[in-house]
Image: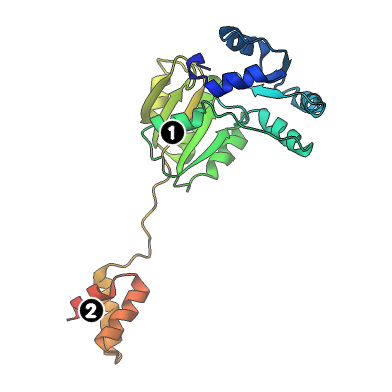
Amino acid sequence: GNLGDITLRALETLKAVDFIAAEDTRVTAKLLNRFEIKKPMLSYFEHNKAEKGEIICAKILKGESCALVTDAGMPCISDPGEELVKQAYSHGIAVEVVPGPTAFASALAVSGQFSGRFCFEGFLSMNKKSRTEHLNSLINESRTIIFYEAPHKLKSTLEDILTVLGDRNISLCRELTKIHEEVNKTTVQQALAALQTAPAKGEYVLVIEGAQKKPDENQYTLEQAVKIAQDEILGGAKKPDAAKTAAAITGCKKNDIYAQLL
């Protein structure tokens, strides 16, 4: 990611460990060279994680220490490092986190969308059927929804979001925690239109407005509540009791109903 985001604790950790597990040793070499750190590296990525995870754990069990580094963002968040953490715990190995840049948290903070409650959904599937099923499960999700997306899939993903979730407010956050950061607060339909003239480049975080709560179809008006109370009175109930019954049925305030009865 952006070398300016490195923390003092991260540098101290990289200097202190015996070896480094890197998603791409060439990318991590740039980081190490920039800060004049010389450590042996071991390649650890999606397609070798099961085998290399056991090798890493075996080295740690023999007394060595290891730092896991990913190419950008936070290791273990939608990242093969998640499996290494599980393997480490299965061997009784202690794991420490060194906090660093996290794309989804950064995107949420800068998105301009509601941040009080959100759900992080990771990457959508390459398969259209699976992607549609995933989106369908979120139709009624009222929290802000966050996805990671690659540039070559962005157009088809936005098309499916428009079809399934509708034309919602969305923030397209590009290359966060890297160098060429960009945030576009727009709508799904407008984002698709913009792609016609400016093709997607870089990795994206999509921050999507949650579903708006639909008004309760069974909601009563105060006038309807008063009518129910009047019917109760015609049946022999006293005004306070009639107002209480109507309030329980409709959800309207008892005092408001009683005031109307008077």
The answer to which image quadrant residue 256 occupies is bottom left
User: Mark 1: which amino acid?
Assistant: Leu
Q: Position of residue 47 (x, y in %)?
A: 73, 22
Give the camera-side residue of 3 and 134.
3
Total marks in image = 2
Question: Which residue is depicted at the point 72% across and 36% down?
Answer: 86
SS type, badge 1: helix
Under circle 2, the secondary element is helix
Q: Is residue 130 left or right of residue 90?
A: left
Using a 10 Å C-alpha cutoff, classify the residue at mark 1 as few (fewer than 14 neighbours), some (14 to 19) or many (20 or more).
many
Crowding near the residue tagged with mark 2, few <14, some 14–19, many ≥20 C-alpha atoms within 10 Å: many
Residue 78 in picture, x, y percent from top left: 61, 31
Comparing marks 1 and 2, which lies closer to the viewer?
1
Residue at point 42%, 45% (across, down): 211
Q: Which residue is mark 1?
A: 108
Residue found at x 57% / y 32%: 124
Instruction: Give the x, y percent position of residue 247.
Output: 32, 75
Q: Report how far apart the C-alphas of labels 1 and 2 lie in the structure.
A: 47 Å
Kind of residue at badge 2? Tyr
Judging by the rendered image, the residue that carries numbered circle 2 is 258
